[in-house]
Image (spheres, rainbow, N blue to C red):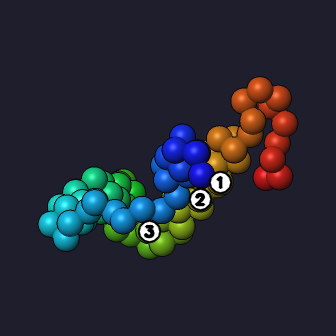
Amino acid sequence: MHPDTEKWFADRTFQEPAWTPSCLTAAKAGRRVSVVLPAALLGAIFPFVCHLSVPPDRKAGQLVSVLYGANIAGSTAGTCRASMPASSGAPTGC
């Protein structure tokens, strides 16, 4: 095989990874900080806003369910809008 061809295949096929266990441990710790912490904080915001904005009376359950329904509708609409191709503006099935 020609040396250039061999190098081309070697660059595009699986080779022994140069990762050490300490590199993988550091990457896992970084993932905790960059993914888990923001997800936990963002997931706690909406229930906290509900707690602050809904008075504790007989209609609390109804108001919280309306807030959660509006949140779900907004999330669905935002996902559908974001999934539309920017160039054509055609919906993708939502």
Residue nearest the viewer, comparing 92 with 19: 19
Q: Residues within 10 Å of mark 1 (few under 14, many from 20)?
A: few
Q: Residues within 10 Å of mark 3 (few under 14, many from 20)?
A: some
**Where is mark 3, residue-wise?**
60
Rounded to the nearest angstrom, the CA distance separating label 3 from label 1 is 24 Å
Q: Residue at x 59, y 52 (%)?
A: 1
Q: Residues within 10 Å of mark 2 (few under 14, many from 20)?
A: few
Q: Using the image, determine if residue 81 lies above or below residue 73.
A: above
Q: Is residue 91 left or right of residue 6?
A: right
Q: Are marks 2 and 1 in contact (CB under 8 Å)?
A: yes
**Front disc: 2 or 3:** 2
**Where is mark 1, residue-wise?**
76
Residue nearest the viewer, comparing 39 with 46: 39
Q: Residue at x 26, y 62 (%)?
A: 19
**Where is mark 2, residue-wise?**
72
Question: Is label 2 in a helix, a strand or a loop?
Answer: helix
Given the image, on which type of amino acid does mark 1 rest?
Answer: Thr
Rounded to the nearest angstrom, the CA distance separating label 2 from label 1 is 6 Å
The location of residue 71, given as percent across then percent down, is 55, 55
Given the image, on which type of amino acid does mark 2 rest?
Answer: Ile
Residue farthest along the top direction in this orientation: 87
The disc, 2 or 3, on the residue closer to the chain's N-terminal end is 3
Rounded to the nearest angstrom, the CA distance separating label 2 from label 3 is 18 Å
